[in-house]
Amino acid sequence: MTDPYNSAPAAATAQGLTDAMVTTALELPGYRVVRNLGIVRGLTVRSRSVVGNFIGGLQTLFGGNITIYTELCEQARHETYREMLMHARQLGANAIIAVRYDATELMAGLTEVLCYGTAVVVRPHPDS
């Protein structure tokens, strides 16, 4: 797959970029950033089917957690997170810091979900 976000050739796949190396913080405890590779992101646009909207509408009559929409949100967040990881690996990152999610309603029933962060190369602190 080509990198849709950069025109430069993708770097070799980074080893060690696991969920444990992804954080919302601005630093990763026990590591120091040795190179900043830039912003990485995952993006998806989702809508619920007519049947899904009908079921969701019925669930709103009873109140509480609207599970069909909860599942849709979880799927969208999971998909964008995985796309962000893939983008970071393409750049050669072994960590991502300052991760955030954003969602925007493009039109009624159509939502964009974005997951983004800063791809970095980190090394363990010598005193760790």
Image: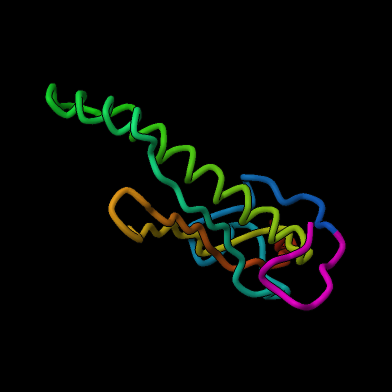
Magenta span includes 2? yes
Viewer-proximal residue, 42 or 52? 52
Q: Is residue 48 above or below residue 127?
A: above
Q: Residue extending furthest right?
A: 12
Instruction: Name the residue nearer the viewer: 33 or 4.
Output: 4
Magenta highlight range: 1-12
User: On the picture, is 94 further left or further right than 24?
Assistant: right
Q: Position of residue 7 (x, y in %)?
A: 75, 77
**Residue 62 image offset from top left, x and y in percent:** 13, 21
User: In the image, what residue occupies the spot 44% across and 47% down?
Assistant: 46
Q: Quadrant of the N terminus?
A: bottom right
Main SS class of the magenta portion in the image: loop
**Image position of 79 (left or right of 128):** left
Question: Residue 28: where, in percent of width, then height?
Answer: 59, 59
Q: Nearer the viewer, residue 86 or 17?
A: 86
Q: Position of residue 34 (x, y in %)?
A: 72, 73
Colour mapping used in the image: rainbow
Is 36 above or below relative to 3? below
* Residue 111, magenta (yes or no): no
Name the residue furthest front: 50
Q: Residue at x 71, y 74 (%)?
A: 6
Query: Is 51 on the left-hand or right-hand side of 20?
Result: left
What residue is rendered at 66% in x and 61% in y?
Answer: 31
In this view, 89 is above or below 26: above
112 vs 36: above or below: above
Q: Which residue is rendered at x = 61% and y = 66% of the image?
A: 40
* Image quadrant in which the C terminus is located: bottom right
